[in-house]
Image (cartoon, helix red, strand yellow):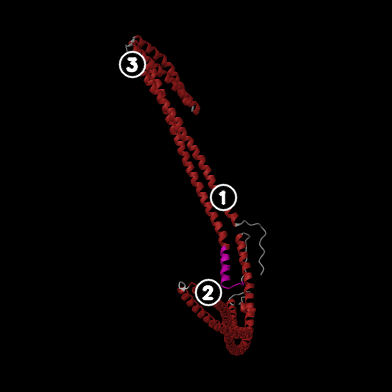
Amino acid sequence: MGMPRLMNRPALTLGHRFGLGFSLILALLVAITAVSQVLMSAMGQQMKAIVEVNERQMHLASQMIDKVNEMGLHLRTLTLLTDIKEVDRHMQLLQRTTAGVLAIERELQDALAADGAPQEFSTLITRISQQRQSVLPLIARAARLGADGATPEATTVLMKEVRPIEEQWRQAVADLIELEQHRSAQAYAQAKSRQQVASVVLVIACALSIGLGAFLAWRLTRSVLVPVNQAIEATERIAAGNLAQPVLPTRRDELGRLLLAVGRMQAQLQGLVGAIHESATSISVASSQIATGNQDLSHRTERQAASLQKTASSMAALTTTVRHNASAVHQADQMAVLASQTAARGGAVVDQVVTTMAEISASSRQIEEITGVIDAIAFQTNILALNAAVEAARAGEQGRGFAVVAGEVRGLAGRSADAARQIKSLIHTSAQRVASGATLVADAGSTMREVVASVHRVTAIMSEISASTSQQSDGIEQVSGEVGQLDRMTQQNAALVEQSAAATESLKAQAMQLQGTVGVFTLGSDEPVTAQCA
């Protein structure tokens, strides 16, 4: 909705208003501070004049009276002394006192001249100077008379000539002190008066500052509270659901922009609430359609799940059968491997027997050779025994014992030859039998090798059958697992379809609830949003 056109005149922002107000108050405070500083400076100068100048002049005047009294004391003492040394000492003291009086008088004249003292001070200083000029020659003459021992004459000069002028001199100094006191009193009264004036000025300035500050605070507060209250009323109406009454800003400052922003927010809320209601209606219709589709999908999914369960049962039975066959083939393969191992061990034993028979045949041949050697040794022994018998016969009676031994040796050689012939005959027979056994064992070894080769071929064939059966079993189990997983996925899909149906019903209920919620807003012509969007 449109906003009213604001005035084109420039408006001060809140920052400018508060800045100007506080700047004015600060300017008043600065002015008050400056006036106070000026008044305080003036009072400080007066107090400084009272404390430093007037008091110093009064102090110099008091010192002058003290010096005048000291001169009179020294002068009277001189008129009474007779000792030359004491007279000289007091003359020196009198001269120093006179010099001090002159110095104090000059310092006092300089102070009054620098201070710009009134005319009466100059008149008094002139009178004091004249009386000092008049009395000092008389004092000097009286002092000389006293020093010369003319005490009566000195006393006469002192009493008749010096004393009257000295009294006038002292009175003039006293008048100066009194005039200084009067001047200090006047300065104090002026300072007191200025202090009172400064107090009145400060009170008036503070009162003006307070009044102006209160007025500025009232104006600033009023300029802020009115649009703030308008913004509060607008936000309360919006919070209550009334979006029909427009928000009209009447200012161009920050608060005017605040009201303008509230109006824009209200306009956007109007469009947003209408769009939400339309979306809720669309969601309600769409959720009804989705719920119908989900019901059909749920029925089809249930039928598919039942079919997959039957297929899974058949695959489970087939898997069990194939697994049993694979187990039997595996056992047959193990038995074939065991038979192959046994045949291999038999062949190895036969090979060992063949080797042993060959070794026995070789040993028999060695024994035949050894028997031949023994037979040859027996033959040679017999020949040696014959030779020994011949030699014994030749020896006659002396070779008789040797002949007996030779006969025994011949007998042993004959028995050895007989035994060797028997052993040779037995060894020959054994060798023939060993040769026959070796031939038989060789034939048995060849047969065992053929058996082992056949068993190896059977074992290889059984291993291939076992591997093929295992692969078939694994494939069938994998197919069964896939079917089971497909069954589970189908069941999960069925559950998801049911959840989707439930969520769709919940979405439909929430859409209806959202329609009821946005129905509390009034958008245009005092009609609820449900009536406008229907």
Q: Nearer the viewer, residue 99 or 281?
A: 281
- How crowded is the residue under tag 1: few (<14 C-alpha within 10 Å), some, or many (20+)? some
Could you give the CA–CA distance between mark 2 and mark 3, rounded to whole angstroms?
202 Å
Q: Is 154 left or right of 43, judged from the image as shown?
A: left
In the image, which is nearer the foreground, mark 1 or mark 2? 2
- Which region is colored magenta? 228-244
Residue placed under numbered mark 2 in the picture: 387
Residue 477, x across and y down, in percent: 60, 84
Give the number of the disc on residue 77.
Answer: 3
The amino acid at mark 3 is Thr
Residue 203 appearing in the image: yes
Is the residue under label 3 in contact with that under label 2 (CB below 8 Å)? Answer: no
Task: Give me the residue at 61% from left, 72% from top.
Answer: 243
Task: Give me the residue at 54% from left, 52% from top.
Answer: 212
Helix, strand or loop for disc 1: helix
**Secondary structure mostly seen in the magenta stretch:** helix
Q: Answer above or below: position of 483 versus 395.
A: below
Name the N-terminal-most of marks 2 and 3. 3
Give the number of the disc on residue 24.
Answer: 1
Helix, strand or loop for disc 2: helix
The amino acid at mark 1 is Leu
Residue 211, x across and y down, in percent: 52, 52
